[in-house]
């Protein structure tokens, strides 16, 4: 059965691969093929993606510094009944990248916004990372300034579940040093180069990973995860059956 045509006046948020081009979805390809225009964070980069899939489509730039002006243009086009596919450099638009403002503007204008879900680095990292996924807190990027980073990390100490960060390869060693100071006993997982040739998961306490980072330079893209604090289960006197257990034959 043929899928229905795109709905006029809709902003489609199209997730694109975070490394492995096979991760594009059939629906993403159809939306990119059938939309009126593709709004991209970086038109050159998205142009290459479209070319790879043999899609020829007008591209408009929608990057951080002209997002406000571009938002207005996009809203105008949507009001005229066009269909717009919004893509960012990689992954799901709006997750730690520009795009949020366009969504906000479209919703404010009463327009339809539809997700076309697909790759997302934080989800890929969590699913294979081995840390609890029943409860997690996505932090995104930490601020750049040392004092602000430290304050933010300290503020996350009482947060339950797995903590998930995005970090630039240039700051990964610095971050491990900071984690050693703030979360020395927690398990850290570095998810490096997800879906790419050199994908790997590095696990250990911050100090162990710091030693590793000093031995070999850690390059590429990273998702950093911090496991929850281990529960110290002090048995209450009422249910302390340790003696019984010990003496049981
Ligand atoms: N919107 C994207 C998503 O859905 O994941 C994230 C965009 S954000 C600007 C880029 C950051 O995502 C990188 O600095 C890195 O922390 C993380 N990232 C993206 N691709 C990755 C990959 N293949 N492996 C590990 N981390 C990745």
Image (cartoon, rainbow, N blue to C red):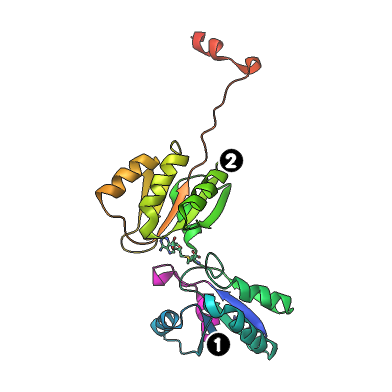
**Which mark identifies residue 57?**
none
Pointer 1 residue Cβ closer than 8 Å to ligand 1? no
Question: In the picture, residue 160 is in which quadrant?
Answer: top right
According to the picture, the residue beneath numbered tag 1 turns out to be 37
Within-10-Å neighbours for mark 1: few <14, some 14–19, many 20+:
many
| Front position in the image: 209 or 83 | 209
- Closest to the observer, 62 or 125: 62
Relative height, residue 205 to residue 249 (above, below):
below
Q: Residue at x 44, y 44 (%)?
A: 179
Picture quarter with the N terminus? bottom right
Q: Position of residue 237 (x, y in %)?
A: 63, 15
Q: Nearer the viewer, residue 28 or 229?
A: 229
Q: Is residue 159 above or below residue 243?
A: below
Residue 20 seen anywhere in this rendered image of the structure: yes
Determine the residue positioned at 63% across, 79% down. Answer: 11
Image position of 15 with respect to 35: above or below: above
Q: Residue at x 28, y 55 (%)?
A: 217
Q: Is residue 19 part of the magenta span, yes or no?
A: yes
Read off the magenta span. 15-36
Is there CB contact under 8 Å for labels 1 and 2?
A: no
According to the image, label 2 marks what residue?
158
Image coords of residue 152 (percent x, y)? 54, 49
Q: Which residue reaches farthest right?
A: 110
State the residue at coordinates (53%, 77%). 65
- Residue 44: % across, % down: 42, 83
Give left or right: position of 128 versus 200: right
On screen, residue 128 versus residue 209, left or right, reads: right
- Does 212 appear above or below 83? above
* Image coordinates for residue 58, horizontal then vertical, percent: 50, 90
């Amino acid at each position: 059965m043929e899928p229905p045509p795109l709905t006029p006046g809709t902003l489609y948020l199209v997730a694109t691969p975070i490394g492995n081009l096979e991760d594009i979805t059939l629906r993403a390809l159809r939306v990119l093929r059938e939309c009126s225009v593709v709004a991209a964070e970086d038109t050159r980069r998205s142009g290459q993606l479209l070319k790879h899939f043999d899609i020829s489509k007008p591209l408009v730039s929608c990057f951080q510094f002209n997002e406000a002006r571009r938002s207005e243009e996009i809203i105008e086009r949507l009001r005229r009944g066009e269909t717009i596919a919004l893509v960012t450099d990689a992954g799901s638009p709006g997750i730690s990248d520009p795009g949020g403002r366009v969504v906000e503007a479209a919703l404010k204008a009463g327009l339809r916004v539809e997700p076309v879900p697909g790759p997302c680095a934080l989800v890929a990292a969590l699913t294979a990372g081995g840390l609890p996924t029943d409860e997690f807190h996505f932090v995104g990027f930490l601020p750049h300034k040392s004092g602000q980073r430290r304050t933010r990390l300290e503020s996350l100490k009482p947060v339950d579940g797995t903590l998930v960060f995005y970090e630039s390869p240039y700051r990964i060693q610095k971050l491990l040093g900071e984690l050693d100071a703030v979360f020395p006993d927690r398990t850290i997982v570095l998810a490096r180069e997800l879906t790419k040739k050199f994908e790997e998961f590095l696990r250990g306490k911050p100090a162990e990973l710091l030693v590793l980072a000093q031995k070999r330079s850690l390059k590429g893209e990273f998702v950093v995860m911090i496991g929850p604090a281990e529960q110290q289960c002090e048995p209450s006197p009422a249910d302390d059956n340790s003696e019984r257990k010990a003496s049981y034959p």
